Amino acid sequence: MKLFVYNKNADLHCISAKETLIHTMGVSDLKHLQRYTMWEIEFENSANNNDTITTLLNKSYLLSNPNKHHHSVETPPKNTPNYWYIEVKSQAKGEDIETKNALNKSFNAKIKTLTQSIVWEIELTSPDHNTEHFISTKLALTTNKENGLLVNPLYETARIVKANDL
């Protein structure tokens, strides 16, 4: 199960990234940029997982703070065919064992694995057959001062996908 968490109000990190890409790095085709925290949750069994997620979201601040976050289960809330996604994972951090253990202990959630990644949602003004390459080289993988910003290849890995493949 996937849980997408995003800010209710201004995401200053995302705004800064978008402004840098457009005004400093000259990426004039960038129409939309949104940032999510994506939790991938695998339960020990498949029964009542929606009820468990509802309980975790309503009674815990570990996955999402309802005072400042919205959330969406399984897909990002907008998820249109025009959007591309960059899933960014830390090379150093795998499973979030501390959060998993806290949720299992406090709520008997029966979570088997819990991982966290950042997902960037992107829409370009004029996508074409080279869109994935453009996103990879101009937006995602940092290679020099002129190319890439959203992924640091020294300690992060990235996967670029269309809306249906996330």
Image (cartoon, grey):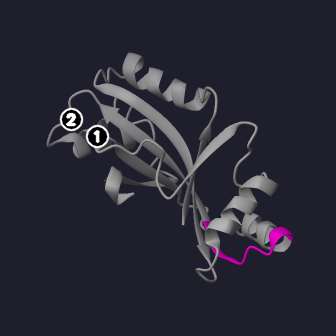
Q: In this view, does 106 lie above or below 112?
A: above
Left or right for 102, reference 36? right
Residue 143, visible in the rendered structure: no
Relative to the observer, which residue lies in front, 59 or 138? 59
Relative to the observer, which residue lies in front, 5 or 54? 54
* SS for callout 1: loop
Left or right for 39, reference 56? left
Q: Mark 1: give few (<14), some (14-19) or many (20+) Cα within 10 Å.
A: few
Amino acid type at circle 1 is Asn
Could you tell me which quadrant the C terminus lies in? bottom left
Residue 35, visible in the rendered structure: yes
Marks 2 and 1 close (CB-CB < 8 Å): yes
Of tags 2 and 1, the one toward the viewer is: 1
Residue visible at 62% across and 80% down in the picture = 47
Amino acid type at circle 2 is Pro
Q: In this view, does 156 lie above or below 149?
A: below
Circle number at residue 82: 1
Q: What stretch is highlighted in magenta?
A: 106-114
Residue 144 position, x and y percent, is: 37, 34
Q: Is residue 85 above or below residue 157?
A: above
Q: In which quarter of the image is residue 60?
A: bottom right
Count of marks placed on residues:
2
Could you tell me which quadrant the N terminus lies in? bottom right
Mark 2–mark 1 distance (CA, rounded to whole Å): 8 Å
Q: Which residue position holds label 2?
A: 127
Residue visible at 33% across and 56% down in the picture = 164
Q: Mark 2: give few (<14), some (14-19) or many (20+) Cα within 10 Å.
A: some
